Image: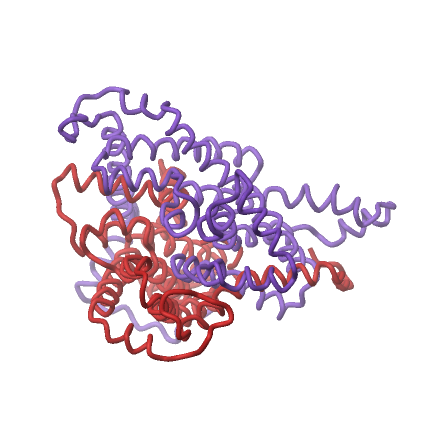
Amino acid sequence: MVVSEAPPRAASGPGRRVGAVLFRHPALRLALMLLPAVLWLGGLYIGSLGILLTYSLYRLQEFTGLVVRDVGLSTYALLWQPANREIVVRTVAMAASVTVACAVLAFPVAYYMARYATLRMRTLLYLVVIMPLWSSYLVRSIAWRAILAGEGLLPWVLDRLGLDGLLRLALQAPLVGGPSLVQSKLSLFIVFTYLWLPFMILPVHAALERVPGSLLEASADMGARPRTTFRRVVLPLAKPGVVAGSIFTFSLTLGDFILPQIFGTSEFFLGQMVYTQVGVAGNLPLGAAFTFVAMAIMLVYLGAARRAGAFEAL
Amino acid sequence: MRTTSTPRAGLGLRIATFLVVAFLYVPLLVMILYAFTTQTAAFTFPPPGLTTRWWSIALGNERMWEALRLSLVVAGVSTTASIVIGGLLAAAVYRARFAGRDALAFLVVLPIALPGIVTGIALRSTFAQLELGFSTWSLVVGHTTFCIVIVYNNVVARLRRMSPSLAEASSDLGASGWQTFRHVVMPNLATAVLAGAILAFALSFDEIIVTTFVAGQQQTLPIYIFSILFRPRQKPVVNVVALVAIAITFVPVLVAQLLTREEGGHVR
């Protein structure tokens, strides 16, 4: 706690008089403090979401390429075309697989930090995990180009280990494969997992840290083997943290349109579709409709996460 | 989750932890290596030779510096706006109970809880609706929207940790409300505001999703990096610019993390 020494005697000046007026009128002061945020978030942000909703109800006149400002659901009907449905399914499947991979990889680090690491080690690991969150996401994805390149680091390592056949097999596989490693869903999956992993480690660690060690000792005292304690005590208590982390891994994968342009096959993902419709095709209504699909999926997900107690773990 | 006698982790757990940490950092090491490779169009491992010529090509590029300048301006202005809006909101939400308080606390998180593309396209449709063009200001509006929550989170976390008796003691000793704020509350909040500001700056500096939708023809540093990504020649130049981008925010962010370490546990 810092307390600056010797507060000066009450001075008189315009600034001080304004301060005194505000001090005597708490409601006025509160209103002034809230005003910028209410204008920005309640006005600009919510207003923009409203305008976006309006645009999704407009449609594009196919021959002229102009937006027709008639309110209707014809743009949403387009989402039911098989090609568009596939995009949604593909994106949700990717988001779900990335979330599972992040949870699996996050667990050992979070568990080690919460249960075994010394204070120094814990601080170090905390910084190691949190620094990537604040470094450029684009830079971190670019870093993988040299690893996944045809003659890059990963193929080199697999070759030395005699596992190059495995890589060829994976690239021919129907769901994960592609013409080359960079142009495969496998690489997109790896880089997504890499990018969002810290978002999962932190909440899982926070959840595990709240588990008292005595609880584990009690479980052992009552005759549970370590495996049983882990499955019946640690995992259930870690669940809210995993769900909290999954909000980030899921939401971030769902809306991303940068990574599928660098890695992966030519098949579109949801964010890419929005980007193309808005930026290239000039079809703001269809882009807006796709955005609301992403929002609807996220709202359902957030509702489920809330029931699983994730909000207390954030 | 600490036992009275800290047990030693099993070998398997230690190896797994090490591998995951390696997974987080090896790519960055590889990127540094390939900022020096002699190849122009491939990333062969191991690199056939090393050179520093990509650094002079990258740093001699006028467009790189213009993009960097725009990114710094946008991040600076957005951060300043976020300090005002987010700081005031945090103080108000912490001190007072009022109608809509929970709604506002939820609303402030929404721009980063929803996929970034939602914020981007929503603001873009507003600009289209109001027939406003794209400028530095459209970028500032976009970035401030998701930076407010960063300052807000940091300040709220600090306020929660501050003992209320401190401010009470100050008024008991005869300080006015303003004096208490100026001489007791503010010095305690200062590092939280600073940390929040640094993190908001870093987030704005690196952002590309919302930026793409509100930039028009302008190029921030991430957009510039993305634009040179698919050039078939001079591939290592991208790695050089990427390293410049990451170097600018690394030390400030580290400082911010150390300033707010005890409040950790909140993701962004």
Name the quadrant containing residue B127.
top left
**Residue drawn where x is 20% and y is 60% of the image:** A17
Residue B35, image x and y in percent? Answer: 40, 72
What chain is the red one? B
Residue A42, placed above or below residue B243: above
| Front in this rendered view, residue B200 or A129 | A129
In the rendered view, would you say A116 is above or below A241? Answer: below
Q: Position of residue A189 (x, y in %)?
A: 50, 47
Residue B106, percent across and down? 40, 41
Residue A308 falls left or right of residue A133: right
| Residue A242 vs residue A217, the one in the foreground | A242
Give the residue displayed 49% in from the left and 64% down from the top.
B27
Q: Residue B89: x and y, percent?
A: 33, 50
Q: Residue at x 23, y 48 (%)?
A: B214
The foreground one among B61 and A287 is B61
Can the viewer see residue B112?
Answer: yes
> Does residue A171 appear left or right of residue A68 in this picture?
right
Q: Which chain is purple?
A: A
